Image (tube, rainbow, N blue to C red):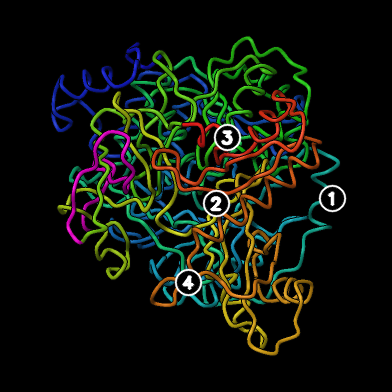
Amino acid sequence: MGGENLAYTGVEGAKRLTNEMPWEARDVPKTVFEMISRTATAFPERNAISFQLESGPGDRAETLSWRQFQGQVAQAANMFRAMGVGADDVVALVLPNCLETAVVTLGGMVAGIVNPINPLLEAEQIASILRETGAKVVVTLKSFPKSDVAQKTAEAVRHAPACHTVLEIDLNRYLGPPKSWLVPLLRPKMPARCHADVKPLLAEMAKYPTTLQFDDRPEDRVAAYFHTGGTTGMPKVARHLVSGIVYNGWLGATLLFREDDSIMCPLPMFHVFACQVMLIGAATSGAHIVFPTPAGYRGDGVFDNFWKLCERWKSTFIIGVPTAFSALMQRPVDADLSTVKLAFSGSAALPQELFKRFEKAAGVKILEGYGLTEATCLVSCNPDQGERKYGSVGVPFPYTEVRILDNSQGEVRECGPDEVGEICIASPGVYPGSTYTEAAKNADLFHYDRYLRTGDLGRLDEEGYLFITGRAKDLIIRGGHNIDPAVIEDALASHRDVAFAGAIGQPDARAGELPCVYVELVAGATADAEELMAHCKVHVHERAAIPKHVEILDELPKTAVGKVFKPDLRKLAIKRVYDAALADAGVAAEVTEVVDDRKRGLTARLRRTGEVDQEKLRHVLGNFTRPWEWAEATEAA
């Protein structure tokens, strides 16, 4: 496996590749267009990217070869330059997946700085990102049935004065009759035109040649902006250098993909996992990447048809997140998966029980990894040909240095093996000192001006495997989607009866975490949990952030300076959720306490209330990411 047939066996394999030569001396592309051109020259007629609008295994699909893809990327880049996009200017994309999304993503990187934006965000948040980046051109959808992307983007552009052109993609071209005849009749109405010119993307691209018409700057520069999560307010926008993008592609081509591989990727290209790892990895290695439906896993019928889709496209790699693998386990494996080598899971922790069930049902090994937007993406992964350690996110990739640092006593020190501290990283994917577009957000972001502070807590064991034990930052990660707890807390703060609110992620067997909130009322208040939940449904503007549980406490736990102490709230949530799951399954056990274990983070301690079916117990709690242990075992020790 791997473009150079290099077995990635773990720590020693990573060291060997790192020690062969410095990263700067490796023969890697110096620009994004050079990267695509190398692949198009080596494999001109091989399949590059396929897309199907509908999820059926026999539905219409369209495929570009690497030669065709290179030509369209050149056309897009030439078009953007003609529209006034220079190397330091921004092309924003508010798009679901389709062939054009891949083309304009790389075309935007070649011409200037591409900024993919989550189309599920509200118009207000899209507008704030457009203003923050000063986007000159926006590419989005033409109005399409069952989609509000075009309408939200139009509203956002109204509040982004730097944007002078909107380019539209019409998904109707992927449909055949009679559905294609109906779309013009069913298109939702658009608001009145704003200050920007609105043009059809493909018609504009067709005006330009398929060879690049300007000098592709060889010096390293920013080529992409990716925003981190975001609900309401302004998400942080991270800068990605060409060198970081090339590094992620090199990892994919060296350790993962060959030109005869086929990658099933139902993740959105506005996310770094799908874009900077999978799409760029394919563009470096020559592998074929498949995007089923605009919404990927969220698309109608994708889960029901998933195994048949893998059979259709002869997938060798499956890309997903824990929520997707959990949903797939609800469907029978009804297809030939003999071509599949591996499944990769990222974005959130994967429960051990889900590992086992998926591998048993599908006969496919899962590798769990770790990455983050601020590092372009990749940091570590369990090795495909070395030891996998359940609960770990593997070993750091070549040229990536992970250090566990602690500055709780006011002085930075390095933690020893199995000692928990903050995960800090340095790699060719990290942009020291200038990670975010907003300068204030770069303050205190690095240790020794080199090691990016991830905000995640973890440890390295004696063999160099990385374990994530918690988060220094408070983000709630729902199925890989980041939710800022302040969104929930601010909404509740507007209720007259609320004195304090603390929002956290409670364990969930499918999504990893779901938002919940604990509330302290003002003296004499009469509001109940039902009223506060109704308030959240009105004032929390993103559906994913609406809490699944609201609980009123006499007093919230607080620090000495009066700040809500969230570790205690997480303990309450773990006990409540685990006790409910055990009771529902008929397991005679309950949580006595939740402790902060030095190695494993928050850990539930159980006691027996009767005869316990051990297998059922492991099955029930194995669906959650937080560990557990028997209380009597710790007492005996």
Q: Identify the element where label 2 is drawn.
A: strand
- Name the residue rendered at 57%, 35% in the picture: 632
Magenta residues, start to end: 410-433
Q: From mark 3 to mark 4, how far is it between C-alphas?
A: 30 Å
Q: Identify the element where label 1 is drawn.
A: helix
Q: Identify the element where label 4 is drawn.
A: loop
Q: Is residue 335 magenta?
A: no
The numbered mark at residue 558 is 4
Q: From mark 2 to mark 3, how far is it between C-alphas?
A: 32 Å
User: Could you tell which of marks 4 and 1 lies nearer the N-terminus?
Assistant: 1
Q: Are marks 2 and 4 in contact (CB under 8 Å)?
A: no
Foreground pick, 67 / 453: 453
Query: Is residue 202 left or right of 240 when viewed as pictured?
Result: right
Picture coordinates of residue 7 (x, y %)?
Answer: 35, 12
Of badges 2 and 1, the one in the foreground is 2
The residue furthest front is 636
Neighbor class of circle 2 (other Cα within 10 Å; few <14, some 14-19, many 20+) is: many
